[in-house]
Image (tube, rainbow, N blue to C red):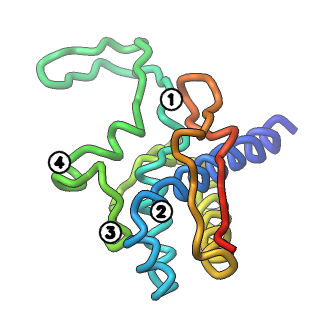
Amino acid sequence: LGFAFTMVTGGNDTTTGMFGGAVQLLTQRRDQRQLLIDDATLIPGAVEELLRLTSPVQGLARTTTRDVEIDGVTIPAGRKVLLLYGSGNRDPRQYGPDADEVDIRRDPRQILTFSHGAHHCLGAAAARMQSRVALEELLARCPDFTVDIDGVVYAGGNYVRRPLHVPFRAAA
């Protein structure tokens, strides 16, 4: 039962976080939105880019199982470390000098949104599918929209970036 609860709540945070952030990005970058409207085959790749930039789960703590050296600093076994997925997803060494900008034609490889390795999110495929369907439906039914960026309210906490309120307006 606990595992099922984790899947449901985790999936909700990821999907609502991505979608809430995506409509903001697509309001700010209408050129990117228009590319998706003109060519819906770009949507699956755009979902990866939007998941990369929105990083609904900002990071999680882990415990080192052995001594690890990073840039000449040793982190001893048994220490807690905070992995910041949101920061890693904007690393210009991985995604180029425009890593902070949305580019729905970018092919963002190895996004950290769903963690990596043994801790990779079990619901990643479901979250991607939900995000893709939501974006397809939004753009098909309501291609002309705006979000009042200044009115967006986020949930508290350090680990999940999920909007509680997104002032969304569809054009008539």
Question: What crowding class fits label 4: few (fewer than 14 Cα within 10 Å), some (14-19), or many (20 or more)?
Answer: few
Q: Nearer the viewer, mark 2 or mark 1?
A: 2
First in sequence: mark 2 or mark 1? 2
* Residue 42 image offset from top left, x and y in percent: 45, 80
Out of 112 and 157, give the one closest to the viewer: 157
Asked which secondary structure carries label 3, the reply is loop
Question: What crowding class fits label 2: few (fewer than 14 Cα within 10 Å), some (14-19), or many (20 or more)?
Answer: some
Which residue does the numbered mark 4 point to in the structure image? 93
Question: What crowding class fits label 1: few (fewer than 14 Cα within 10 Å), some (14-19), or many (20 or more)?
Answer: some
Which residue does the numbered mark 3 point to in the structure image? 107
Circle 1: residue type: Leu
Compute the Cα span from label 2 to label 4: 25 Å
Asked which secondary structure carries label 2, the reply is helix
Out of 81 and 69, give the one closest to the viewer: 81
Residue at image coords 41%, 80%: 35
Relative to 28, residue 119 above or below? above
What number is the disc on residue 60? Answer: 1
What number is the disc on residue 108? Answer: none
Q: Which of marks 3 and 2 is in front?
A: 2
